[in-house]
Amino acid sequence: MISQGITVLGSTGSIGESTLDVLARHPDRYHVTALSAHSNVARLAEQCKRHHARYAVISETTRARDLQSALDELQCNAEVLAGRAALSAIARLDETDVVMAAIVGAAGLEPSLHAVQAGKRLLLANKESMVIAGELFRKAAAEHATTIIPVDSEHNALFQVLPANFDAGLESVGVERLILTASGGPFLHRMRDTLVDITPDQACNHPNWDMGRKISVDSASLINKGLEVIEARWLFNARPDQIEVIIHPQSIVHSMVAYRDGSVLAQLGMPDMRTPIAHALAWPERVEAGVKRLNLTEIHKLEFYPPDLDSFPGLGLAFQVLEAGGNAPVIFNAANEIAVEAFLQERIGFLEITSVVSAAMDVCETGKIDKLDEVLEFDRLARAATSKIIHLH
Ligand code: NAD
Ligand code: MG
């Protein structure tokens, strides 16, 4: 077997760590070519040592010297690169066959797109980049004949239960609807007026998944599911009316596909991201992921409810964003990133996240997107507008 070279963008995060865990189980199949982190120098150096990485990238350039010292101390000879351009460089390396996109937020867009343009297989956890530049990813993947394999558990589930030729159009392969499941987060069944004083730690205390803080807050507001609806639109060439969301508190059914003949196919598993990561790495083969096996007789019941759009208006907003198209997803995502950051720093309350995003959608100008530069410019403008809204608040 030829060993595949892997670049992990965002290796120190929750998805990055889980990816390295799966890779380490298969030293014959995979080797690490490059790892990246934003600021956690010590963890990145340890990872480079343990996984014999050839390149270590720190995106905060001011930390490059610290990274070099940390590597020297561990007697690790990974080459240090720094800055945003270095992220794209390790996505394009000749020695790399597969890129795991596990950076959080729009910061992950450029290296992920470069990976596709360099013909690499892209394992996509970084949903924000697909939300804001879905059309550019679709074009690049077609032009460079590469596959984008979703790692987000719902989309990975859909990828597993869709027919191989889904890209021809869902209707043409007999698919009626994509049913995305949502756990409902830590505030499931709560009325909106009980969520006023939620703290960042309460919002990040997810019942089923252990994730980074940004996506944890998104899960609590259901904006994560909104981002996933838009992500599904691009990954599966789906129309808005072909995407449905249902609440499933146990997070065992990761999503479902409803076919024209009344069949509904689902993918089930324990809520452990190593399953979709291992699936994406090995596809179309299957490898051990180190995950506890699902035993339904221990779980007893699987529940399903319609989402509560009154308590969690961010999900309804995402469907409007999808209908609007153009730069609306860019504004939605950028405003949410800024609002979540402000919430985590206790500058705004939990309920204000969605109202700030909604206000940003109202003030930002609409526009069309054809190029990466346009995405980046609309993203910049929306961030500035949102910061102003929060400041005046
Ligand atoms: P995290 O916060 O745990 O890790 C983020 C990683 O990105 C870290 O390695 C960090 O160093 C790096 N990073 C952060 N800001 C950066 C920047 N500006 N430039 C370069 N690198 C930067 O996040 P996570 O929970 O691992 O999520 C990563 C992505 O995967 C997100 O897009 C998230 O929505 C998606 N995702 C995560 C999960 C999960 O279970 N954690 C599930 C589905 C999808
Ligand atoms: Mg998900």
Image: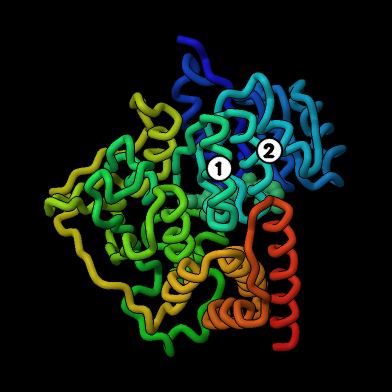
Q: Which residue was labeled with disc 1? A: 139
Q: Secondary structure at mark 2?
A: strand
Residue at the location (24% across, 55% down)? 176
> Mark 2 packing: few (<14 Cα in 10 Å), some, or many (20+)?
many
298 to 141, vertically: above or below: below
Q: Position of residue 259 (x, y in %)?
A: 19, 51
Mark 2 near ligand 1 (CB under 8 Å)? Answer: yes
In this view of the protein, can residue 156 be seen by the observer? yes
Distance CA(mark 1)–CA(mark 2): 26 Å
Q: Position of residue 50 (x, y in %)?
A: 62, 25
Quadrant for the C terminus, please: bottom right
**Residue at position x 67%, y 81% in the image:** 363
Q: Quadrant of the N terminus?
A: top left
> How are the colours assigned in the image?
rainbow
Question: Which x, y percent locates residue 324?
Answer: 51, 70
Residue at 67% x, 20% y is 94
Q: Residues within 10 Å of mark 1 (few under 14, many from 20)?
A: few
Q: Amino acid at mark 1?
A: Lys
* Mark before the other along the chain sequence, 1 or 2: 2
Residue 8 falls left or right of residue 165 = right
Q: Taking 222 as reference, is 387 left or right?
A: right
Which is in the foreground here, disc 1 or disc 2? 1
Q: Which mark is residue 36?
A: 2
Q: Are marks 1 and 2 in contact (CB under 8 Å)?
A: no
For this rendering, which residue is in front, 50 or 370?
370
Amino acid beneath label 2: Ser
